Every structure is written in structure tokens, then in C-alpha cells.
Amino acid sequence: MASLSSVGISGSGLDESLITKLVAVQKQPITDLNNRTDAIKTRLSTYGQIQSALSTLRDAAAKLTNPSTWAGSKTTTSDATVATATAASSAVGNVTLAVSQLASAQTLAGPTLSGPTATLGQGTLTLELGSWGTDSGGAATFTSKSGSTPVSISIGATDTLATIRDKINGAGAGVTAAIVTDATGSRLTLSSSQTGETNAFRVTVADGDGNSGDASGLSQLAYDPSSSASQMTLTLPAANARALLNGLPISSETNTLSSAIDGLNITLLKASSPPATANISVSQDRDAIKKAISDFTTAYNAINQLLRTQTKFDASTLTSDTSADAQKQAQLQRLSSLQGDSTALGIMNQLRGIVGGSTSLGGSLKRLSDLGLAPGTDGNLPTASTKLDTAMNNLDDLKKFFMGVDSTNDSNSGFATRIRSTVDAMLGTDGSVSSRQAAIQKQISANNKQADTMQARADSMEKLLRQQYSSLDQTYSKYSNLATYLTQQLSKL
């Protein structure tokens, strides 16, 4: 509000507090309206909490209506140092595992040089993926990998060991290079990017010194046993993983067996001679199902408790003080809850009606009480019971009890199915929660607009009063001066 000049500018003594009091009386309805608006905003905030709690309940119910929740499997391994396993929903049973060899990547080590800045000379390195074998005479043979192409890398005379490493790593040949440095010097190591017998490699050299088979120049990085040109040392051969699954031999280029048994992924961790053994048990994941049910009841209890707290009549907000201020305060306290709010009460009654109902789809399981989950006096559901543990022995009926769908009678569908569809409707664009939030927001906007109008009216009245009092002050001053003059003239007579 803009500042206004004070009255009494000529010393008339008119009391400016008169204006302040009159304006305060004019603004009192604005204060009352703002207090009511604050209470309405509290309602809107509470509906935000309701929306969030309902969303959590919907998600928990959706999980119980998801077939994957009921089809999950879990694995148990007798020796987790030998292997780990994960199972898809279709895998159930027991597997015996004996691991004699892990998959490995071919690794070579070059000669020891003075350091990463050492040079070897110019020429061309050619890296080629494939597999090593022997012929009938025991000589080494190399078979190129199907679909792969040899990669040639040009090496300059000034290229250091570090530069050669970087060129190999940037060539995309399926081979990675590294430099290992110790007290004796630095060595270039080469490793296959992938494990398995068909991912071995050979290194051929076109040495710039004209001799590609000696132990000097770039030929120091050659490795080709099939041509007897091997200056690098084989530190680890390429190998497949080898194991027995239920007594049947298995060979894999990686240490992950993803297709050996349908629905079961096994990661091999240890091999030995005699073979390292482990038993893998795959069963239905009942713990996950039980947790999903517990999460559902917890989510239901959260929204039930919220609605129960916000809609109940709170006698503590009442006061024996009959003053106007005390009555207004008590009224605002009651408005800050949803006591008497038909939408909130409707939501609570709908949800309680569902959990208090029954279904014929679950066989012998008809009511939540059959699971030991009957609503208590406060409307909350227990989160666990011995009856639920017993019902877990018949997962087919329990599944239908929660996620069954009755196409002819919605009220007979499973409990999670009904909760999910009901909450979806509540939270929809035209649902009860969304509509109530929109109505409350509209009321807040209307109150704010009305408060602005009332404030403008009060400001206008204050301005007018100050103008009137200023005019009165000036008139009073004029007549006061005249009276003083007349008094002086009369005194002279």
C-alpha cells in the first residue's frame, strides 16, 4: 500500500489514530478471509497427502496383480565361491555343477625394455583373431575366426612403447594392450578383449629392418607359433569354460552359462582339479510374494490412518472461552482437518467396503480374515499372520484371491484387482480426488480475488479519509488564525 501523508500538518492536533482505527475496522474482514483461505490451503495440502498415499496403495496393488510377482523364482547355491545363479520364472528344480576350467583370454608379454619411452623401430603389426590348434604331427596351427578381419597397424621409428600401446588400443582389433613396469623395466602385454578359444590371436610383424623373425627391432612383438616367429611369451592361453551340468559336459567361451539350462543363468567363479562342485536349487520365490502382500497392507494402513485422522471430530479444538477470537480460532482449527468432508469420507468408506468384502475366486480363501488380515477396530490390516503363512502353501488360490478378475461381477474380483481399479478411478482426471482438489483450488483463487478487491476498497477509503482530514485541518487552521486576529483587534479597542 502506498504511503499517505499524515493529518494535523498545521498543528490543529487532530488525532491520526482515528484514521488507523477506521481503516483497521475496514480491513478486519480481509484478515478473516485470509485466515479462512489458509485453512482451505491446509485442506488442499491434505488432499495432496491423500493423493500420494493412494498412489502408493495403487502401486502395491498393481504389484499383486502382476503375474511376474507370482511367478518369480529364487536360487540357492551350496557353495557361492564356485558359482552364482539367477533364475527366470520358468526355472524350478535342482542342478549339480562341477567346474574343471574357467574361460580365459589369451595374454602375451613382450621383452623387458628400459621404460615406456623405449622405441622398437618401424614396421607394421598385424593382429588377427582366431583359434590355436595342432596338426597330426603336433605342430601349431592357427584358424582365423569367422567374420573377423586382420588389422594392420603402422609403427614409426620414433614411436615409443606407450605410443604402440595406444595405437593397438585404438585399432579395434579385439586386442587390448598395457604396459607393466617393475624393477627390471617395462613390458608390453597384449590380451584378447573376450574370453574363449575362438578369441585367441596372433601377431605378425613386417619389420622395417628387413628381418621379421629375429629378436631385434619391431619383430620383438611377434607371436605366431605356426611360423616359429614368436618373441612374445604366452602367459595365459585362450580357453573355454568347462563344466558338468547334471553330469553332462558343457563348454562355454565365457564364464556365464545363459543357455545351458532354460531359464537359469549361471556365473562360474572357481575351477579346480578335481572339479569344484556346487548344488544349485531353484524354487518359487515365496518371500517376494509375502513381501508384496505386506507392502499392500502397509500401504492400505497408511491411507486408512490418514483419512481416519483427518476426518474425525477433534474435541480438543473446542474451547469454553466464549470470546469471538477464541470461537474463530476453534472454527479454523476444525477447518484445517477434513472433518465432515464428504469426498474424504467417501474414499475411506469405499476402501473399507472392499477390504471388508469377499471373493469366491480364491477357493477356500474368501475373506481377508482367512489370511489373518481382517481389519481391526481402527480399520487397519495386520501385516503378517500365521494364517497367511499357511495360505502360502496354496499359491494358486492365494494368487486368485488377490489378482483374480470376475468379468461379470466386479465386486467379486480379487482384492488387489478391486483396490487398483477403484484407486485408478479416484486419481483419474475426473476422479473424486482430482475433482476435489480442483474445487478447493478454485475456492482459494476466488478468496484471493475477493481479498484483493477488499484491500483496494480499504486503501481507497484510507486515501479519502486522509484527504478529508487534511482539508478539515486546513480549515481549522484558517479559522484559528482569524480568531487570533480578532482577539488582538478587540483587545486594542
Image (tube, rainbow, N blue to C red):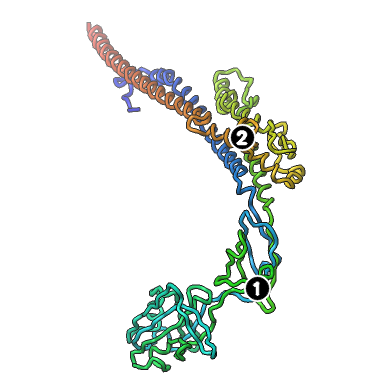
Q: Nearer the viewer, mark 2 or mark 1?
A: 1
The quadrant the C terminus occupies is top left
Distance CA(mark 2)–CA(mark 1): 50 Å
For the question of whether residue 140 can be seen, the reply is yes
Of residues 108 and 54, the one nearer the viewer is 108
> Would you place residue 214 above or below residue 447 in this image?
below
Q: Residue at x 70, y 42 (%)?
A: 397
| The N terminus, quarter of image | top left
The answer to which image quadrant residue 337 occupies is top right
Q: Secondary structure at mark 2?
A: helix
Disc 1 residue crowd, few under 14, some 14–19, many 20+, Cα 10 Å: many
Residue type, numbered disc 1: Val
Hey, which residue is sitting farthest top in the picture? 493
Q: Is residue 331 above or below residue 424?
A: above
Q: Between residues 256 and 165, which one lies in front from this camera angle? A: 256
Question: Percent from the top left, x then y, of residue 135?
Answer: 52, 87
Residue sitting at x 40%, y 78%: 150
Within 10 Å of disc 2 (Cα), the crowding (few <14, some 14-19, many 20+) is: many
- Viewer-nearest residue: 309 or 222: 222
Q: Amino acid at mark 2?
A: Arg
Name the disc covering residue 418, or none.
2
Residue 138 x %, y %? 54, 89
Residue 221 in percent (x, y) is at 43, 86
Where is residue 223, by image quadrant? bottom left
Say which quarter of the image contains residue 14. Answer: top left
Name the residue beneath numbered marker 1.
99
Give the SS element for disc 1. strand
From what the image shows, is residue 351 above or below residue 142?
A: above
